[in-house]
Amino acid sequence: MKMGLVGEYIAGLGLDAAKQYMESKIDEHKLKCALKEYIESERKYNDICTMAEECDFQGLVEYITQELLDDVENRFFAVSANDRRKAHEEIISKAVVYSKASTTESKKRVSRLIAISLEIVRQFFKKKIVASDYLLAAEIVDAVNEKIAPVVKSSTSVMQNTVLDSKKELSNQLDMVKQSIENGFLYSVENMSQIAASGQYSQVEKNLRKLLVGISVEHPFYPDYGFTFDGNILKSTPLSEVAQQKYPARLNFKGTIRAGSHYFNDASVNPMDYAYRHQLKLVMSIDEAVKLLGNRPDPIQTEAKQYIGKEIIAIPPEFPEAFPCSIKVGEKTYFDYILLRTEEILDDGTYVIGNKEQTNSAIYFEIKVNPQNPQKEDFKVNIANANNHELLNYAKFMDELAQVKDLHIYALNAKKDFIAGIINSVNYETGFESISEEIDFLKRVCAIEDYFHVELNISGDINEEEYHCVFRISELIFNDEVDSTWKEVSFTGVLGKEFRKQLEKLNTPTPIVMLSYVGICDVNLFGAEFEFKYMRTYKCAVMQELNRIKRLVSCLEDGDPIKIKFAPGEDNSAFDTLHIPEKIEQDT
Protein backbone atom coordinates (compact mmCIF):
# COMPACT_ATOMS: atom_id res chain seq x y z
CA MET A 1 0.00 0.00 0.00
CA LYS A 2 1.46 3.36 -1.01
CA MET A 3 2.16 5.99 1.64
CA GLY A 4 0.32 8.51 -0.57
CA LEU A 5 -2.88 6.53 -0.21
CA VAL A 6 -2.53 6.35 3.57
CA GLY A 7 -2.05 10.11 3.57
CA GLU A 8 -5.25 10.65 1.57
CA TYR A 9 -7.27 8.54 4.06
CA ILE A 10 -5.91 10.31 7.12
CA ALA A 11 -6.44 13.74 5.57
CA GLY A 12 -10.03 12.90 4.66
CA LEU A 13 -10.99 11.22 7.93
CA GLY A 14 -9.42 13.84 10.17
CA LEU A 15 -11.37 16.47 8.27
CA ASP A 16 -14.68 14.55 8.41
CA ALA A 17 -14.37 13.99 12.18
CA ALA A 18 -13.88 17.67 12.87
CA LYS A 19 -16.17 19.30 10.32
CA GLN A 20 -19.32 18.85 12.46
CA TYR A 21 -17.70 20.91 15.24
CA MET A 22 -15.54 23.45 13.40
CA GLU A 23 -16.81 23.53 9.82
CA SER A 24 -16.68 27.29 9.56
CA LYS A 25 -13.19 27.58 11.01
CA ILE A 26 -11.05 25.27 8.88
CA ASP A 27 -9.64 25.26 5.37
CA GLU A 28 -10.29 21.80 3.96
CA HIS A 29 -7.61 22.05 1.27
CA LYS A 30 -4.88 23.24 3.63
CA LEU A 31 -5.64 20.53 6.18
CA LYS A 32 -5.37 17.78 3.56
CA CYS A 33 -2.15 19.24 2.22
CA ALA A 34 -0.62 19.49 5.69
CA LEU A 35 -1.37 15.87 6.52
CA LYS A 36 -0.37 14.56 3.13
CA GLU A 37 2.91 16.50 3.21
CA TYR A 38 3.91 14.58 6.32
CA ILE A 39 2.78 11.16 5.04
CA GLU A 40 4.64 11.74 1.74
CA SER A 41 7.78 12.59 3.68
CA GLU A 42 7.65 9.02 5.03
CA ARG A 43 7.65 7.45 1.57
CA LYS A 44 11.40 7.22 1.17
CA TYR A 45 11.75 5.68 4.61
CA ASN A 46 9.12 3.10 3.72
CA ASP A 47 11.02 2.21 0.52
CA ILE A 48 14.26 1.52 2.38
CA CYS A 49 12.97 0.03 5.66
CA THR A 50 14.47 -3.17 7.04
CA MET A 51 12.59 -6.44 7.27
CA ALA A 52 12.13 -5.87 11.01
CA GLU A 53 10.36 -2.57 10.28
CA GLU A 54 7.94 -3.95 7.70
CA CYS A 55 4.21 -3.91 8.40
CA ASP A 56 0.94 -4.58 6.58
CA PHE A 57 -0.11 -1.19 5.23
CA GLN A 58 -3.18 -2.74 3.68
CA GLY A 59 -4.38 -3.82 7.14
CA LEU A 60 -3.62 -0.36 8.51
CA VAL A 61 -5.75 1.23 5.80
CA GLU A 62 -8.60 -1.18 6.52
CA TYR A 63 -8.60 -0.07 10.15
CA ILE A 64 -8.55 3.58 9.11
CA THR A 65 -11.47 3.13 6.72
CA GLN A 66 -13.63 1.08 9.10
CA GLU A 67 -13.04 2.24 12.70
CA LEU A 68 -10.71 5.19 12.91
CA LEU A 69 -13.37 7.83 12.29
CA ASP A 70 -15.19 7.22 15.57
CA ASP A 71 -11.96 6.98 17.51
CA VAL A 72 -10.73 10.26 16.01
CA GLU A 73 -13.94 11.99 17.07
CA ASN A 74 -13.50 10.72 20.65
CA ARG A 75 -9.83 11.63 20.59
CA PHE A 76 -10.50 15.29 19.80
CA PHE A 77 -13.98 16.09 21.00
CA ALA A 78 -14.92 13.81 23.94
CA VAL A 79 -15.95 15.81 27.01
CA SER A 80 -14.05 13.61 29.46
CA ALA A 81 -10.27 13.76 29.41
CA ASN A 82 -10.20 10.09 30.34
CA ASP A 83 -12.38 9.24 27.31
CA ARG A 84 -10.09 11.20 25.05
CA ARG A 85 -7.07 9.41 26.54
CA LYS A 86 -8.64 6.00 26.02
CA ALA A 87 -9.57 6.91 22.45
CA HIS A 88 -6.00 7.88 21.69
CA GLU A 89 -4.72 4.68 23.26
CA GLU A 90 -7.23 2.65 21.24
CA ILE A 91 -6.20 4.30 17.97
CA ILE A 92 -2.55 3.36 18.39
CA SER A 93 -3.27 -0.16 19.68
CA LYS A 94 -5.77 -0.94 16.93
CA ALA A 95 -3.42 0.43 14.29
CA VAL A 96 -0.68 -1.90 15.57
CA VAL A 97 -3.05 -4.90 15.43
CA TYR A 98 -4.46 -4.14 11.99
CA SER A 99 -1.00 -3.47 10.50
CA LYS A 100 0.25 -6.80 11.92
CA ALA A 101 3.24 -5.00 13.40
CA SER A 102 4.99 -7.79 15.29
CA THR A 103 8.42 -6.34 15.92
CA THR A 104 9.49 -3.43 18.05
CA GLU A 105 10.61 -1.51 14.99
CA SER A 106 7.39 -2.00 13.05
CA LYS A 107 5.22 -1.03 16.07
CA LYS A 108 7.26 2.13 16.40
CA ARG A 109 6.58 2.99 12.78
CA VAL A 110 2.80 2.54 13.09
CA SER A 111 2.58 4.43 16.40
CA ARG A 112 4.67 7.27 15.07
CA LEU A 113 2.64 7.55 11.88
CA ILE A 114 -0.75 7.65 13.69
CA ALA A 115 0.39 9.87 16.59
CA ILE A 116 2.03 12.49 14.42
CA SER A 117 -0.84 12.55 11.94
CA LEU A 118 -3.41 13.09 14.70
CA GLU A 119 -1.28 15.79 16.27
CA ILE A 120 -1.06 17.59 12.92
CA VAL A 121 -4.85 17.70 12.82
CA ARG A 122 -4.96 18.90 16.43
CA GLN A 123 -2.45 21.66 15.80
CA PHE A 124 -4.31 22.70 12.68
CA PHE A 125 -7.58 23.03 14.60
CA LYS A 126 -5.78 24.81 17.41
CA LYS A 127 -4.45 27.43 15.00
CA LYS A 128 -7.92 28.04 13.58
CA ILE A 129 -9.87 28.17 16.89
CA VAL A 130 -11.17 31.59 17.92
CA ALA A 131 -11.22 32.78 21.53
CA SER A 132 -14.81 31.64 22.11
CA ASP A 133 -13.83 28.02 21.32
CA TYR A 134 -10.56 27.92 23.19
CA LEU A 135 -11.97 25.81 26.00
CA LEU A 136 -12.11 22.87 23.64
CA ALA A 137 -8.54 23.48 22.58
CA ALA A 138 -7.40 23.55 26.19
CA GLU A 139 -8.98 20.23 26.84
CA ILE A 140 -7.23 18.76 23.84
CA VAL A 141 -3.88 20.09 25.08
CA ASP A 142 -4.48 18.58 28.50
CA ALA A 143 -5.32 15.24 26.93
CA VAL A 144 -2.08 15.28 25.00
CA ASN A 145 0.00 16.07 28.10
CA GLU A 146 -1.75 13.40 30.17
CA LYS A 147 -1.74 10.59 27.57
CA ILE A 148 1.85 9.50 27.89
CA ALA A 149 1.93 8.26 31.49
CA PRO A 150 -1.20 6.04 31.39
CA VAL A 151 -0.14 4.57 28.09
CA VAL A 152 3.28 3.77 29.49
CA LYS A 153 1.79 2.10 32.59
CA SER A 154 -0.78 0.05 30.67
CA SER A 155 1.46 -1.06 27.87
CA THR A 156 4.24 -3.51 27.67
CA SER A 157 7.80 -2.30 27.62
CA VAL A 158 7.66 -2.40 23.83
CA MET A 159 4.70 -0.03 23.71
CA GLN A 160 6.36 2.24 26.28
CA ASN A 161 9.37 2.68 24.06
CA THR A 162 7.11 3.18 21.05
CA VAL A 163 5.12 6.03 22.62
CA LEU A 164 8.20 7.74 24.06
CA ASP A 165 9.96 7.66 20.68
CA SER A 166 6.83 8.93 19.00
CA LYS A 167 6.58 11.84 21.43
CA LYS A 168 10.16 12.85 20.80
CA GLU A 169 9.81 12.72 17.05
CA LEU A 170 6.42 14.39 17.28
CA SER A 171 8.00 17.57 18.62
CA ASN A 172 10.39 17.85 15.67
CA GLN A 173 7.75 17.05 13.07
CA LEU A 174 5.23 19.52 14.51
CA ASP A 175 7.79 22.30 14.46
CA MET A 176 8.24 21.70 10.74
CA VAL A 177 4.49 21.57 10.10
CA LYS A 178 3.82 24.72 12.12
CA GLN A 179 6.52 26.60 10.27
CA SER A 180 5.11 25.44 6.94
CA ILE A 181 1.60 26.58 7.89
CA GLU A 182 2.81 29.96 9.17
CA ASN A 183 4.80 30.78 6.05
CA GLY A 184 2.27 29.38 3.55
CA PHE A 185 2.48 25.88 2.23
CA LEU A 186 5.84 24.81 0.80
CA TYR A 187 4.63 24.54 -2.79
CA SER A 188 2.11 27.40 -2.86
CA VAL A 189 2.53 30.04 -5.55
CA GLU A 190 2.85 32.71 -2.87
CA ASN A 191 5.58 30.87 -0.98
CA MET A 192 7.53 29.95 -4.14
CA SER A 193 7.28 33.52 -5.42
CA GLN A 194 8.69 34.85 -2.14
CA ILE A 195 11.61 32.42 -2.29
CA ALA A 196 12.35 33.39 -5.91
CA ALA A 197 12.07 37.10 -5.09
CA SER A 198 14.67 36.64 -2.38
CA GLY A 199 17.08 35.16 -4.89
CA GLN A 200 17.04 31.65 -3.43
CA TYR A 201 16.81 29.98 -6.84
CA SER A 202 18.48 26.78 -5.70
CA GLN A 203 15.77 26.48 -3.03
CA VAL A 204 13.12 26.96 -5.71
CA GLU A 205 14.69 24.13 -7.71
CA LYS A 206 14.86 21.97 -4.61
CA ASN A 207 11.20 22.59 -3.78
CA LEU A 208 10.11 21.83 -7.34
CA ARG A 209 12.04 18.58 -7.28
CA LYS A 210 10.42 17.69 -3.97
CA LEU A 211 7.01 18.48 -5.44
CA LEU A 212 7.59 16.16 -8.37
CA VAL A 213 8.89 13.47 -6.03
CA GLY A 214 5.80 13.88 -3.89
CA ILE A 215 3.25 13.64 -6.70
CA SER A 216 5.15 10.82 -8.40
CA VAL A 217 3.83 8.36 -5.82
CA GLU A 218 0.40 8.83 -7.41
CA HIS A 219 1.65 7.54 -10.76
CA PRO A 220 -0.04 4.20 -11.61
CA PHE A 221 3.36 2.69 -12.39
CA TYR A 222 5.16 4.00 -9.29
CA PRO A 223 7.87 3.23 -8.15
CA ASP A 224 9.06 2.46 -11.69
CA TYR A 225 7.61 5.65 -13.18
CA GLY A 226 6.90 9.12 -11.80
CA PHE A 227 6.18 12.58 -13.15
CA THR A 228 8.40 15.29 -14.61
CA PHE A 229 8.04 18.49 -16.61
CA ASP A 230 9.39 18.57 -20.14
CA GLY A 231 8.96 21.99 -21.67
CA ASN A 232 5.38 22.98 -20.93
CA ILE A 233 3.89 19.53 -20.43
CA LEU A 234 3.77 17.04 -17.59
CA LYS A 235 5.18 13.68 -18.65
CA SER A 236 5.84 10.24 -17.26
CA THR A 237 9.50 9.59 -16.53
CA PRO A 238 11.27 6.37 -15.55
CA LEU A 239 12.47 6.27 -11.94
CA SER A 240 13.93 2.78 -11.68
CA GLU A 241 16.61 1.07 -13.71
CA VAL A 242 14.14 -1.58 -14.89
CA ALA A 243 11.32 0.82 -15.78
CA GLN A 244 12.00 0.74 -19.49
CA GLN A 245 12.31 -3.02 -19.49
CA LYS A 246 9.09 -3.59 -17.58
CA TYR A 247 7.02 -0.85 -19.20
CA PRO A 248 8.73 0.35 -22.40
CA ALA A 249 7.35 3.71 -23.53
CA ARG A 250 5.98 3.82 -27.07
CA LEU A 251 3.51 5.75 -29.18
CA ASN A 252 0.70 3.93 -30.94
CA PHE A 253 -0.61 5.74 -34.04
CA LYS A 254 -3.57 5.21 -36.31
CA GLY A 255 -3.75 6.94 -39.68
CA THR A 256 -2.74 6.63 -43.33
CA ILE A 257 0.74 5.85 -44.64
CA ARG A 258 1.98 6.70 -48.11
CA ALA A 259 5.23 6.75 -50.04
CA GLY A 260 4.99 9.19 -52.90
CA SER A 261 1.49 8.61 -54.34
CA HIS A 262 1.33 4.99 -53.14
CA TYR A 263 -0.94 4.36 -50.13
CA PHE A 264 -0.46 1.22 -48.05
CA ASN A 265 -3.61 -0.83 -47.61
CA ASP A 266 -1.99 -4.25 -47.78
CA ALA A 267 -0.65 -5.40 -44.40
CA SER A 268 1.78 -7.77 -46.15
CA VAL A 269 3.72 -4.83 -47.62
CA ASN A 270 6.34 -3.32 -45.35
CA PRO A 271 6.13 0.48 -45.80
CA MET A 272 9.73 1.07 -44.69
CA ASP A 273 11.00 -1.56 -47.11
CA TYR A 274 8.94 -0.09 -49.95
CA ALA A 275 10.14 3.46 -49.20
CA TYR A 276 13.75 2.28 -49.12
CA ARG A 277 13.53 0.31 -52.37
CA HIS A 278 11.97 3.24 -54.21
CA GLN A 279 13.91 5.93 -52.27
CA LEU A 280 10.72 7.78 -51.33
CA LYS A 281 9.78 9.70 -48.21
CA LEU A 282 7.40 7.80 -45.95
CA VAL A 283 4.56 10.05 -44.77
CA MET A 284 2.12 9.08 -42.00
CA SER A 285 -0.95 11.25 -41.41
CA ILE A 286 -1.99 10.82 -37.74
CA ASP A 287 -5.70 10.43 -36.96
CA GLU A 288 -5.37 8.85 -33.50
CA ALA A 289 -2.46 8.65 -31.06
CA VAL A 290 -1.99 6.90 -27.72
CA LYS A 291 1.13 6.75 -25.57
CA LEU A 292 1.66 3.37 -23.92
CA LEU A 293 3.81 2.21 -21.04
CA GLY A 294 4.15 -1.46 -21.75
CA ASN A 295 0.69 -2.54 -22.84
CA ARG A 296 -1.21 0.01 -20.73
CA PRO A 297 -1.99 3.65 -21.56
CA ASP A 298 0.26 6.29 -20.04
CA PRO A 299 -1.82 8.32 -17.53
CA ILE A 300 -0.70 11.47 -19.35
CA GLN A 301 -1.62 11.61 -23.05
CA THR A 302 -0.56 15.22 -23.73
CA GLU A 303 2.49 14.12 -25.70
CA ALA A 304 0.44 11.76 -27.87
CA LYS A 305 -2.29 14.34 -28.55
CA GLN A 306 0.29 16.71 -30.03
CA TYR A 307 0.66 14.33 -32.99
CA ILE A 308 -3.03 14.15 -33.92
CA GLY A 309 -3.72 15.91 -37.22
CA LYS A 310 -0.04 16.12 -38.09
CA GLU A 311 2.27 14.24 -40.45
CA ILE A 312 5.31 12.20 -39.52
CA ILE A 313 7.92 12.00 -42.26
CA ALA A 314 10.52 9.26 -42.34
CA ILE A 315 13.48 9.48 -44.74
CA PRO A 316 14.71 6.04 -45.79
CA PRO A 317 18.45 5.27 -45.76
CA GLU A 318 20.23 6.10 -48.99
CA PHE A 319 21.50 3.47 -51.37
CA PRO A 320 25.27 2.82 -51.37
CA GLU A 321 27.37 5.54 -52.96
CA ALA A 322 28.09 5.60 -56.68
CA PHE A 323 31.14 3.74 -57.94
CA PRO A 324 33.25 4.68 -61.01
CA CYS A 325 33.16 2.47 -64.08
CA SER A 326 34.28 2.48 -67.68
CA ILE A 327 32.12 1.21 -70.54
CA LYS A 328 33.73 -1.06 -73.11
CA VAL A 329 32.77 -2.94 -76.21
CA GLY A 330 35.08 -5.89 -76.39
CA GLU A 331 38.44 -4.47 -75.34
CA LYS A 332 37.81 -0.94 -76.61
CA THR A 333 36.84 1.70 -74.07
CA TYR A 334 34.28 4.25 -75.21
CA PHE A 335 33.42 5.90 -71.89
CA ASP A 336 36.28 6.37 -69.45
CA TYR A 337 34.43 7.47 -66.32
CA ILE A 338 30.79 6.71 -65.56
CA LEU A 339 29.45 6.89 -61.97
CA LEU A 340 26.93 4.10 -61.48
CA ARG A 341 24.62 3.78 -58.49
CA THR A 342 21.56 1.78 -57.51
CA GLU A 343 18.59 4.04 -58.26
CA GLU A 344 15.66 1.78 -57.43
CA ILE A 345 14.81 -1.77 -56.45
CA LEU A 346 11.61 -2.91 -58.13
CA ASP A 347 8.96 -4.99 -56.39
CA ASP A 348 10.21 -8.19 -58.05
CA GLY A 349 13.74 -7.59 -56.71
CA THR A 350 15.17 -6.14 -59.93
CA TYR A 351 17.92 -3.58 -59.35
CA VAL A 352 17.87 -0.45 -61.50
CA ILE A 353 21.41 0.89 -61.79
CA GLY A 354 22.29 4.11 -63.59
CA ASN A 355 24.28 7.34 -63.59
CA LYS A 356 21.54 9.97 -63.23
CA GLU A 357 23.50 11.68 -60.47
CA GLN A 358 26.48 12.26 -62.75
CA THR A 359 25.57 15.80 -63.75
CA ASN A 360 28.64 16.33 -65.94
CA SER A 361 27.68 13.47 -68.27
CA ALA A 362 25.46 13.86 -71.33
CA ILE A 363 25.00 10.13 -71.62
CA TYR A 364 22.76 8.09 -69.35
CA PHE A 365 23.19 4.38 -68.82
CA GLU A 366 20.53 2.21 -67.19
CA ILE A 367 21.07 -1.43 -66.33
CA LYS A 368 18.36 -3.64 -64.87
CA VAL A 369 19.50 -6.85 -63.25
CA ASN A 370 17.74 -9.32 -60.97
CA PRO A 371 20.03 -11.37 -58.68
CA GLN A 372 17.54 -14.25 -58.98
CA ASN A 373 18.00 -14.26 -62.75
CA PRO A 374 21.38 -12.64 -63.50
CA GLN A 375 21.44 -13.86 -67.09
CA LYS A 376 18.47 -11.70 -68.00
CA GLU A 377 19.90 -8.21 -68.10
CA ASP A 378 18.24 -5.14 -69.56
CA PHE A 379 20.58 -2.47 -70.89
CA LYS A 380 19.53 0.98 -72.03
CA VAL A 381 21.52 4.02 -73.03
CA ASN A 382 20.35 7.53 -73.89
CA ILE A 383 22.03 10.80 -74.65
CA ALA A 384 20.79 14.35 -74.20
CA ASN A 385 22.28 17.85 -74.41
CA ALA A 386 25.45 16.40 -75.85
CA ASN A 387 28.03 18.28 -77.88
CA ASN A 388 29.14 17.02 -81.30
CA HIS A 389 32.14 15.14 -79.94
CA GLU A 390 29.93 13.29 -77.44
CA LEU A 391 27.40 12.53 -80.17
CA LEU A 392 30.16 11.14 -82.35
CA ASN A 393 31.49 8.88 -79.57
CA TYR A 394 27.96 7.70 -78.76
CA ALA A 395 27.25 6.86 -82.42
CA LYS A 396 30.52 4.97 -82.74
CA PHE A 397 29.79 3.10 -79.47
CA MET A 398 26.33 2.04 -80.64
CA ASP A 399 27.63 1.03 -84.07
CA GLU A 400 30.37 -1.08 -82.50
CA LEU A 401 27.97 -2.62 -79.99
CA ALA A 402 25.53 -3.55 -82.75
CA GLN A 403 28.29 -5.42 -84.56
CA VAL A 404 30.42 -6.91 -81.73
CA LYS A 405 27.63 -7.23 -79.10
CA ASP A 406 30.18 -7.77 -76.29
CA LEU A 407 29.45 -5.21 -73.54
CA HIS A 408 31.63 -4.76 -70.46
CA ILE A 409 30.94 -2.46 -67.51
CA TYR A 410 34.29 -2.34 -65.78
CA ALA A 411 34.51 -1.27 -62.10
CA LEU A 412 37.59 0.94 -61.85
CA ASN A 413 38.19 0.54 -58.10
CA ALA A 414 37.70 -3.21 -58.08
CA LYS A 415 39.60 -3.53 -61.38
CA LYS A 416 37.22 -6.12 -62.75
CA ASP A 417 34.00 -6.36 -64.70
CA PHE A 418 30.90 -5.38 -62.75
CA ILE A 419 28.63 -6.64 -65.53
CA ALA A 420 29.63 -8.28 -68.80
CA GLY A 421 27.55 -10.03 -71.40
CA ILE A 422 26.28 -10.30 -74.93
CA ILE A 423 23.79 -7.65 -76.07
CA ASN A 424 21.68 -9.19 -78.81
CA SER A 425 19.41 -6.24 -79.50
CA VAL A 426 20.74 -2.73 -80.04
CA ASN A 427 18.18 -0.09 -80.91
CA TYR A 428 19.69 3.06 -82.36
CA GLU A 429 17.69 5.60 -84.32
CA THR A 430 19.62 7.76 -86.78
CA GLY A 431 18.44 10.65 -88.93
CA PHE A 432 20.78 9.62 -91.76
CA GLU A 433 20.60 6.82 -94.26
CA SER A 434 22.77 4.73 -92.03
CA ILE A 435 24.66 4.98 -88.76
CA SER A 436 27.95 4.97 -90.70
CA GLU A 437 26.81 8.04 -92.66
CA GLU A 438 25.96 9.83 -89.42
CA ILE A 439 29.37 8.95 -88.00
CA ASP A 440 31.09 10.37 -91.10
CA PHE A 441 29.13 13.62 -90.91
CA LEU A 442 29.86 14.04 -87.19
CA LYS A 443 33.55 13.39 -87.80
CA ARG A 444 33.59 16.26 -90.33
CA VAL A 445 31.71 18.58 -87.98
CA CYS A 446 34.13 17.84 -85.14
CA ALA A 447 37.10 18.43 -87.43
CA ILE A 448 35.76 21.89 -88.37
CA GLU A 449 35.16 22.75 -84.70
CA ASP A 450 38.65 21.68 -83.70
CA TYR A 451 40.45 23.35 -86.64
CA PHE A 452 38.69 26.70 -86.50
CA HIS A 453 37.92 26.68 -82.74
CA VAL A 454 34.20 27.13 -83.21
CA GLU A 455 31.07 25.33 -81.95
CA LEU A 456 28.48 24.19 -84.45
CA ASN A 457 24.96 23.79 -83.04
CA ILE A 458 23.17 21.27 -85.21
CA SER A 459 19.44 21.04 -84.63
CA GLY A 460 16.58 19.94 -86.81
CA ASP A 461 17.02 18.98 -90.44
CA ILE A 462 20.27 19.56 -92.34
CA ASN A 463 19.79 21.07 -95.83
CA GLU A 464 21.87 20.20 -98.83
CA GLU A 465 23.81 23.47 -98.87
CA GLU A 466 24.85 22.98 -95.24
CA TYR A 467 25.83 19.41 -95.90
CA HIS A 468 28.04 20.34 -98.88
CA CYS A 469 29.63 23.19 -96.94
CA VAL A 470 30.59 20.80 -94.14
CA PHE A 471 31.89 18.33 -96.66
CA ARG A 472 34.01 20.87 -98.63
CA ILE A 473 35.62 22.51 -95.57
CA SER A 474 36.31 19.21 -93.84
CA GLU A 475 37.94 17.88 -97.00
CA LEU A 476 40.37 20.78 -96.91
CA ILE A 477 41.16 19.89 -93.29
CA PHE A 478 41.55 16.17 -93.92
CA ASN A 479 43.69 16.51 -97.10
CA ASP A 480 46.71 18.57 -98.14
CA GLU A 481 45.15 19.18 -101.56
CA VAL A 482 41.57 18.84 -102.78
CA ASP A 483 41.35 18.25 -106.52
CA SER A 484 38.73 19.80 -108.81
CA THR A 485 38.16 20.77 -112.47
CA TRP A 486 37.29 24.08 -114.03
CA LYS A 487 36.01 25.75 -117.22
CA GLU A 488 36.62 29.45 -116.90
CA VAL A 489 37.70 31.93 -114.35
CA SER A 490 37.92 35.72 -114.21
CA PHE A 491 40.24 37.87 -112.12
CA THR A 492 39.92 41.58 -111.47
CA GLY A 493 43.16 43.36 -110.71
CA VAL A 494 44.73 46.82 -110.60
CA LEU A 495 46.76 47.92 -113.61
CA GLY A 496 50.41 48.64 -112.92
CA LYS A 497 53.84 48.90 -114.60
CA GLU A 498 54.79 45.26 -113.94
CA PHE A 499 51.57 44.01 -115.53
CA ARG A 500 52.15 46.22 -118.62
CA LYS A 501 55.67 44.74 -119.11
CA GLN A 502 54.45 41.16 -118.82
CA LEU A 503 51.59 41.85 -121.21
CA GLU A 504 53.88 43.36 -123.89
CA LYS A 505 55.90 40.11 -123.98
CA LEU A 506 52.83 38.10 -124.97
CA ASN A 507 52.25 37.92 -128.73
CA THR A 508 50.06 34.87 -128.81
CA PRO A 509 47.98 33.21 -126.06
CA THR A 510 50.51 31.17 -124.08
CA PRO A 511 49.35 28.67 -121.40
CA ILE A 512 50.33 29.59 -117.85
CA VAL A 513 51.45 26.60 -115.80
CA MET A 514 50.33 26.52 -112.14
CA LEU A 515 48.35 29.75 -111.92
CA SER A 516 47.57 30.27 -108.18
CA TYR A 517 45.65 32.79 -106.16
CA VAL A 518 44.71 33.12 -102.46
CA GLY A 519 41.05 33.53 -101.58
CA ILE A 520 39.16 34.31 -98.34
CA CYS A 521 36.03 32.34 -97.57
CA ASP A 522 33.37 33.77 -95.21
CA VAL A 523 31.32 31.02 -93.56
CA ASN A 524 28.04 31.08 -91.64
CA LEU A 525 27.33 27.50 -90.65
CA PHE A 526 25.02 26.12 -87.92
CA GLY A 527 25.11 29.34 -85.96
CA ALA A 528 28.88 29.80 -86.20
CA GLU A 529 30.52 32.58 -88.24
CA PHE A 530 34.16 32.37 -89.26
CA GLU A 531 36.50 32.96 -92.23
CA PHE A 532 39.55 31.21 -93.60
CA LYS A 533 42.13 31.58 -96.37
CA TYR A 534 42.75 28.97 -99.02
CA MET A 535 44.93 28.80 -102.12
CA ARG A 536 43.60 27.59 -105.48
CA THR A 537 45.99 26.52 -108.23
CA TYR A 538 45.08 25.98 -111.91
CA LYS A 539 47.52 23.59 -113.59
CA CYS A 540 47.15 25.05 -117.11
CA ALA A 541 45.47 28.44 -117.71
CA VAL A 542 45.23 30.44 -120.99
CA MET A 543 44.41 34.18 -121.04
CA GLN A 544 41.40 34.94 -123.22
CA GLU A 545 41.03 37.91 -125.71
CA LEU A 546 44.69 38.93 -125.54
CA ASN A 547 44.52 41.63 -128.28
CA ARG A 548 41.46 43.26 -126.66
CA ILE A 549 43.24 43.27 -123.29
CA LYS A 550 46.29 44.99 -124.87
CA ARG A 551 44.18 47.70 -126.46
CA LEU A 552 42.36 48.22 -123.18
CA VAL A 553 45.64 48.53 -121.26
CA SER A 554 46.88 51.18 -123.62
CA CYS A 555 43.85 53.29 -122.80
CA LEU A 556 43.96 52.84 -119.05
CA GLU A 557 46.20 54.45 -116.51
CA ASP A 558 48.08 52.79 -113.73
CA GLY A 559 45.75 52.14 -110.79
CA ASP A 560 42.69 51.50 -112.91
CA PRO A 561 40.91 48.14 -112.44
CA ILE A 562 41.07 45.56 -115.16
CA LYS A 563 39.28 42.21 -115.57
CA ILE A 564 41.01 39.24 -117.24
CA LYS A 565 39.47 35.89 -118.16
CA PHE A 566 41.29 32.52 -118.24
CA ALA A 567 40.26 29.16 -119.65
CA PRO A 568 41.89 25.75 -119.27
CA GLY A 569 44.56 24.74 -121.69
CA GLU A 570 45.35 21.06 -122.27
CA ASP A 571 44.73 20.28 -118.54
CA ASN A 572 41.53 21.51 -116.87
CA SER A 573 42.40 20.25 -113.36
CA ALA A 574 42.94 22.43 -110.28
CA PHE A 575 43.42 21.90 -106.54
CA ASP A 576 42.67 23.80 -103.30
CA THR A 577 44.70 23.79 -100.13
CA LEU A 578 44.77 25.41 -96.69
CA HIS A 579 48.55 25.11 -96.66
CA ILE A 580 49.58 28.39 -98.28
CA PRO A 581 53.29 29.00 -98.81
CA GLU A 582 54.51 31.74 -96.56
CA LYS A 583 55.80 33.92 -99.40
CA ILE A 584 52.49 33.84 -101.26
CA GLU A 585 50.53 34.53 -98.10
CA GLN A 586 52.74 37.54 -97.32
CA ASP A 587 52.27 38.90 -100.87
CA THR A 588 48.51 38.63 -100.57
Image (cartoon, rainbow, N blue to C red):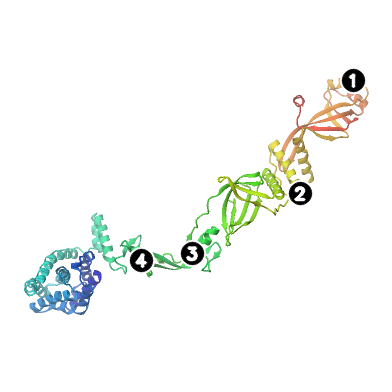
Q: Comparing marks 1 and 2, which lies closer to the viewer?
A: 2
Labelled disc at residue 284: 3
Q: Quadrant of the N terminus?
A: bottom left
Q: CA distance from mark 1 to mark 3?
A: 103 Å
N-terminal of the two: label 1 or label 3? 3
Q: Considering only vertical position in the picture, is 22 above or below 519?
A: below
Relative to residue 245, is residue 467 drawn left or right?
A: right
- Tell which of 21 and 572 is nearer to you: 572
Disc 4 crowd rating (10 Å Cα; few below 14, some 14-19, many 20+) is some
**Residue linked to disc 1:** 505
Q: Is residue 359 at least partly visible in the picture?
A: no
Q: CA distance from mark 4 to mark 1?
A: 123 Å
Q: CA distance from mark 4 to mark 3?
A: 25 Å
**Residue linked to disc 2:** 434
N-terminal of the two: label 1 or label 2? 2
Q: Considering only vertical position in the picture, is 528 above or below 556?
A: below
Q: Comparing marks 4 and 3, which lies closer to the viewer?
A: 4
Give SS at disc 1. Answer: helix
N-terminal of the two: label 4 or label 3? 4
**Residue placed at 35% from the left, 63% from the top?**
244
**Residue placed at 73% from the left, 35% from the top?**
531
